[in-house]
Image: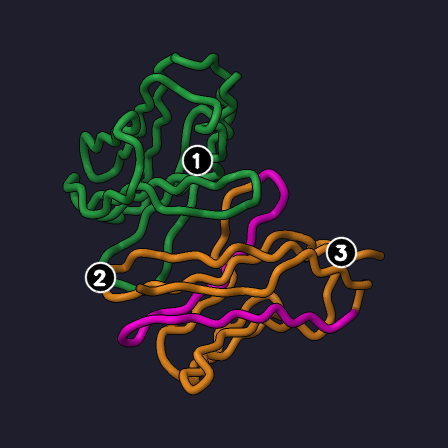
Amino acid sequence: GNSVTQMEGPVTLSEEAFLTINCTYTATGYPSLFWYVQYPGEGLQLLLKATKADDKGSNKGFEATYRKETTSFHLEKGSVQVSDSAVYFCALSGATNKLIFGTGTLLAVQP
Amino acid sequence: DTAVSQTPKYLVTQMGNDKSIKCEQNLGHDTMYWYKQDSKKFLKIMFSYNNKELIINETVPNRFSPKSPDKAHLNLHINSLELGDSAVYFCASSQATDNYGYTFGSGTRLTVV
């Protein structure tokens, strides 16, 4: 079945550091891929998405590229801020539109 | 205007009680979901309804019963609550015909004591 694997956290960075959170997936067909962010005490918000191979999703300085050859959708940001501290979830949606999440990665950015 | 709203935000109750969580969306979406997030932040889908019809029913104890009176509402009723039911429950909605992802509510933190 479909599944998502993302790097375990916590990831601790200093402000302005470069961020990468790895995500790989297993799926039949051509899923859509998503990154969601959950700030403390809040629900999940869609951060970015890509619906086909080589698409790049981007939002708020975050980027991720749908790589079919490596079945990956790694999240990157060039310069993180303290306000980016949150839990980040990689997810995929297949033919049934059911959203399957990775285990989440806690990002802590220190000033 | 809140797109997906859940009530209550917090719920503390004793073992054995029956409780309900309500969810409403004003996005005009045709599909609604319930997810459970455990203490390690793992998210697992429980149920999905499309136009009031149950389409996803994962392995969930039958003490959990969803009810969808119309496509804008999906409520979750839990009978005979157990300690292990303590978690954050998220409602979400989407439009089945697009790939824009889900819109989530802010969650209901259920604590069973």
Query: Looking at numbered disc 2 in the image, what kind of residue is underneath it?
Result: Thr
Query: Looking at numbered disc 1 in the image, what kind of residue is underneath it?
Result: Tyr
SS under mark 2? loop
Distance Cα–Cα, label 2 vs label 3: 37 Å
For label 2, count other residues whose C-alpha is less than 10 Å away and answer few (under 14), some (14-19) or many (20+).
few
Residue at which label 2 appears: B97
Q: Is residue B15 above or below residue B104?
A: above
Q: Is residue A2 above or below residue B53?
A: below
Q: Is residue B99 magenta?
A: no
Disc number placed over residue A82 in the picture, else none: 3
Q: Would residue A40 be seen by someone viewing this image from the given angle? A: yes
Mark 2 against mark 1, which lies toward the viewer? 1
Specify the chain shown as orange.
A
Q: Residue at x 19, y 30 (%)?
A: B69
For label 3, count other residues whose C-alpha is less than 10 Å away and answer few (under 14), some (14-19) or many (20+).
some
Q: How many marks?
A: 3
Disc number placed over residue B89 in the picture, else none: 1
Distance Cα–Cα, label 1 vs label 3: 27 Å
Q: Which residues are magenta?
A: A17-41
Residue B27, percent across and down?
32, 46
Mark 1 or mark 2, which is nearer the start of the sequence?
1
Specify the chain shown as green.
B
Same chain for mark 1 and mark 3? The answer is no
Between A105 and B3, the one nearer to me in the picture:
A105
Same chain for mark 2 and mark 3? The answer is no
Q: Callout 3: residue from which chain? A: A
